[in-house]
Image (cartoon, helix red, strand yellow):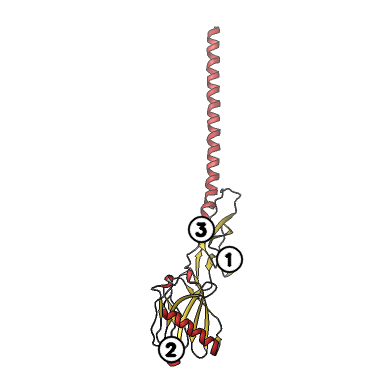
Amino acid sequence: MSLVFVLLRLYLWHLDGVFGVVAGEMKSLSVMEGDSVTLHTDTDIKRNDAVIEWMFGAETPDILIAEIDRAANINDVIDERFRDRVKLDNQTGSLTITNIRTTDSGLYKIVTATNPVVVKTFNVTVYALLHVPVIIRKPSQCSSSVSKCSLLCSVLNVSHVTLSWYKGNSLISSISVFNLSISLSLPLEVEHQDKNTYSCVLNNNISNQTKHLDISELCQHCADFVPIQTGSLVFGLICVVLVIGMIGQWKSVVELELKEEDEDEER
């Protein structure tokens, strides 16, 4: 731990005891993975003679990210996860995190050593990039009795999302997951000749991905297969009948020839 950091800590504790601490309201921000986010201090370091430190933690902000003194000297980031991704504004002390990751979600606390000490907290939620859902037809046996097409909309390894089926603009069904990273699937049944528009939507608080259902592509194949299957069955039965008839006719011819031979021998 650097000497500057130790002295800053002592100075903040001193101000805390002498002047007290003013705690600001917590601000919540949502950002997509890979984007940049700036946490603003709303202060002027030089004008207010301020010393600033930024802390981070998933639940308790106790890991030092960066610090800046009155001379606008920015000390190196101590926590390796933020190295080369954190920038401090030497005028305001505002913190910018670039190429943000889902593991950067959590609480960020700024302690500004002025008179009095000001503490602000930011609750940052980083959402993973969303992929377009995949729609497949559930395996089933096509027959003349099948009137509906069974479908499945799926996504892999997601968290903090909702997967939904829509008929036009109306919600049909949905399923959500929050803390866990799992795969989601949502079934749907439609008529083969259904002319309505259906779509499967994956969304979180700040973005969404939509896959539109093409019934003619996924469902009509099975419907088209039904008459083909029936025709093949009829053709097969006709062939069997013809073969049986030919066998019967051949048998009759053979019996007739044998009978004629027996009569010739008797003569």
Residue 148 placed where, x, y %?
59, 55
Q: Is residue 46 left or right of residue 178?
A: left
Q: Which mark is residue 246?
A: none
Q: Earlier in the sequence, mark 2 or mark 3?
A: 2
Mark 2 crowd level (few <14, some 14–19, many ≥20, 10 Å Cα): many
Residue 158 placed where, x, y %?
52, 64
**Disc 1 marks which residue?**
176
* Residue 4, image quadrant: bottom left
- From this viewpoint, which residue is outermost toward the bottom? 47
Dot 3 amino acid type: Ser
Task: Please say if 161 is above or below 109.
Answer: above
Give the position of the N terminus as an image quadrant. Answer: bottom left
**Disc 3 marks which residue?**
216
Mark 3 and mark 1: Cα distance apart in space: 29 Å
Frontmost residue, 34 versus 203? 34
Give the position of the C terminus as an image quadrant. Answer: top right
Frontmost residue, 263 versus 6? 6
Mark 2 vs mark 1: in front: 2
Residue 44 placed where, x, y %?
44, 90
Check whether the beta carbons of the residues at disc 3 and disc 1 lie within 8 A of each other: no
**Disc 2 marks which residue?**
45
Mark 3 crowd level (few <14, some 14–19, many ≥20, 10 Å Cα): some
Mark 3 vs mark 1: in front: 1
**Element under label 1?**
strand
Q: Earlier in the sequence, mark 3 or mark 1?
A: 1
